[in-house]
Image (cartoon, rainbow, N blue to C red):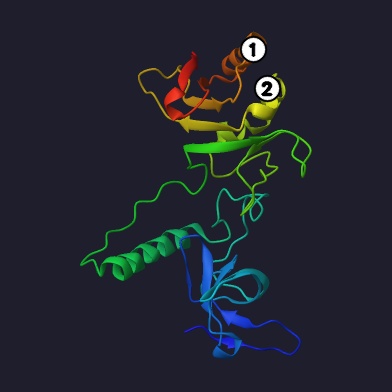
Amino acid sequence: MSTEVRMPNASPIVTIDSLDLEAQGVARQSNEEGGKVLFIRGALPTEQVTYTITREKARFAKAKLHELIKPAVYRTTPRCTYFGVCGGCSMQHLDFAAQIAMKQRVLEDDLWHIGRIKPDEILRPIAGPAWHYRHRGRLSVIDRSIKKGTILVGFHEYNSSYVADMLTCEVIPKRISDLLVPMRELVGSLSIRDRIPQIEFAVGEDINQPSAPQIALVIRHLLPLTPADLQNLEAFAKHHQVGIWLQAQGPESAKPFYP
């Protein structure tokens, strides 16, 4: 069970028991503090931390890490500059091997708590690369954000409607990461720059046609594109060797534009 210590003139210190699916450290308040389950963003199992509550419910509370008193041995320095602000990933502060082990532990716990299933044998996890592994995704686009004042292309900030001001990303393929700034410029060149809410990407390989574009971008547009817009899109696709699809309404409306 979690332990909680009240230090003079300090917030409570708790020991983190486990990690949930959202990579939040799970602990429990003492009975004197209310006995609620705590979900602490940024905290890892075995760590001792202080916290600040951000949202409180009857049986649990959401919190953010205030001070790291005793770090876990598997805590590591996040590789991405935007980690903690961007909501695109949540485990970069955890060693990669430990990430795999903790995800397996969460799966085992869910199998037991939800289905009362305990596997007879657990095979060794199959793990992909630690970085640039996310081959499909949806990037949000915002024009002249009140908060940022410019065109942004990226994931949303954590628990926010704002788009993170990110120039690179360590979890999406490097070719997509390298396109984040050019995609900003592309959107800025369009007549309907404030009516492009998102750009989806998919990255694949074609061993039979190695010269064919391996990247597909699906551009959502809320108003019709002008002939000049279409020229800009085609020039972008040719220069960066990507395929472009256009989506005017729902997913079923997506259709290839280039090549």
Looking at the picture, how far across and down is residue 156, in whole percent? Answer: 62, 46
Q: Against 93, is 31 above or below?
A: below
Residue located beneath label 2 in the image: 192
Give the secondary structure at mark 1: loop
| Amino acid at the residue labelled 2 | Ile
Residue at 55% x, 26% y is 219
Q: Which of the pair 162/65 is nearer the observer? A: 162
Residue at 25% x, 70% y is 116
Q: Against 11, is 84 above or below?
A: above
Looking at the picture, how far across and down is residue 32, in whole percent? Answer: 59, 90
Residue at 35% x, 19% y is 208
In the picture, residue 94 is in which quadrant? Answer: bottom right
In the picture, residue 101 is in which quadrant? Answer: bottom left
Query: Mark 2 near mark 1, Cβ–Cβ under 8 Å?
Result: yes
The reply, left or right, for residue 239 in relation to residue 59 is: right
Q: Which of the pair 96/62 is nearer the observer? A: 62
Q: Against 130, is 99 above or below?
A: below
The reply, left or right, for residue 123 in relation to residue 14 is: left
Residue at 54% x, 19% y is 241
Looking at the picture, how far across and down is residue 217, in whole percent? Answer: 52, 26
Residue located beneath label 1 in the image: 226
Q: Residue furthest left?
A: 120
| Amino acid at the residue labelled 1 | Thr
Give the secondary structure at mark 2: loop
